[in-house]
Amino acid sequence: MKQFIILTFLLLSIFQTQAQEQKDVHLKLTLDEAIKIAETQSIYQFRQKNMYLAKYWNYRSYKAEKRPSLVLNTNPINYQRTITTRYENGEDVLTPYENFTSSGSLDLTQNITFTGGSISASSDFRRIENLESGNLSYSSAPISIGITQPLNGYNEFKWRSLSAPLEFEQAKKEYLQSLQELSLRTVNMFFGLAEAEINIKIAETNLSNADTLYQIGKGRFEIGTVTQDELLDLELGYLNARMSLSQAKINLEQAKSAINSFLGLEKNIHLECIIPSSIPSFKVEVDQAITKAYDNNPDLLSYEQQLIEANRKIAEARGRNGIDANVQVNLGYNKNSQEFSDVYNAPFDNQQIARLSLNVPIIDWGLKRGQVQMAKSDKQVTEASIKQAKIDFEQNVFMEVMRFNMQEDQVKIAAKADTIAQKGYDVTKQRFLIGKVDVIKLNSARNSVDAAKRNYIQSIQNYWQSYYNIREITLHDFKENSTLIKELDYLLQR
């Protein structure tokens, strides 16, 4: 795979360099090659990759939140000059106050997922200088340990720990699914160009045939074997063929521009599609496809996420439906001294803080109870929606499998119809040349040939569309019977 991609880039570099030096570069391209180029340099792939990376780093941030955080807080310069009031000799006296302080702290914090609280440890130091009196003092809290714990029963960390891994796994599968969507878009672009190329060939052939038949018709009209209205029909067919060729050329240029833009190629590179001469021959079992879809499709993770969110809202509403209580406890040591060398020497003073905060609803007119009931109702709606979504999901998988399993026969039928239509037209043309059939039957036979050729190309396109649709839904390669789930660490190295 890597060698193919490197070779593709080298070839593209050569072609794009040549495109700058000369007017046109022509490149024949298979469907597989087009898909590989799209996977390496299309704007769609670039956008999907960066969307995945954004979710990856969001998940990394969540994991970082579960680990201890160490923060240095410092305020090295804090100058203050104010006028203060003090009581002196029985009177209030306004006196200036000017000081200079410096402080710093080192804080270590760890969230506790199981309880929803947090534990912290800190060390503080402070220097205070009174610029009026010249007094200098120091204070320190060498170690202080604290615990904060909400008691309302709602644990935000717990629910985040349930949803975050699912979100990341869903993002991973959505990116893998986007690769199949990319292949599907490439199929449409590829066959859009292939159809435009086929239409050019059909239009050129029709114009050549129409011109030949019109010239023959003019000769027969002179000898009386062709009526004037038949001659007019032949002339009209010739003019329509010229118009069809002009329109086909415009459509071809539009198709070339669209696929070049999609694949990120220079506009002077002209691609020519090599239509697959064969298609893989295999069938997909419905039960296996449904099982793989349930195992791999990111939509199922989305349903699970919705249930977690519904339950989280109920827990949050219940946690707020009553006494809202928090406990904060802090234990440590501190010391004040006028000597820096003494501020970290024993003995230290004990520092103890214990706080219980309560928020007790007295009258809320059923507000919080109503919020709980609303959350429960929302969950019931979510469960019903998910149940219906899963039914629709299975039905969609079933229909896609049925559609794919009959595509191979459709391609064979279209190929046979194309061959028969061409033979029929050749016979009808020969009979027209000897005067056995009229212009109407000849035009009908020509239209049948054109339709058969287009139907054949369309049947091949339908096959590959259905092929990549199945892969996108199940993230499984049924042709090789292998999973499309893989690690994406290589995206971080680019």
Image: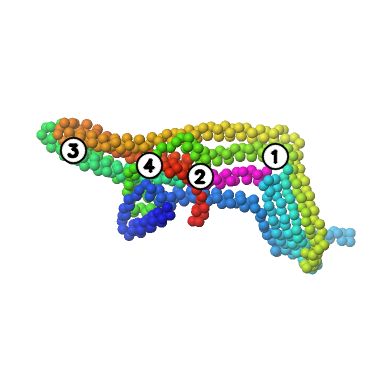
Disc 2: which residue: 174
Amino acid type of the residue that numbered disc 4 sits on in the rendered structure: Pro
Q: What's the distance in space between the residues labelled 1 and 3, CA to CA?
A: 87 Å
Magenta span of residues: 155-177
Q: Which mark's residue is nearer the viewer, 4 or 2?
A: 4
Left or right: where 136 falls relative to 7: right
Disc 4: which residue: 280
Q: What's the distance in space between the residues labelled 2 and 3, CA to CA?
A: 57 Å
Amino acid type of the residue that numbered disc 1 sits on in the rendered structure: Gly
Q: Which mark's residue is nearer the viewer, 2 or 1?
A: 2
- Residue found at x 29% / y 38%: 453
Of residues 407 and 190, the one nearer the viewer is 407
Amino acid type of the residue that numbered disc 2 sits on in the rendered structure: Glu
- Residue found at x 49% / y 56%: 494
Place of residue 476 in the rendered image (x, y in percent of width and height, measured from the top left): 47, 42
- Residue found at x 24% / y 40%: 206
- What number is the disc on residue 110? none
Disc 1: which residue: 319
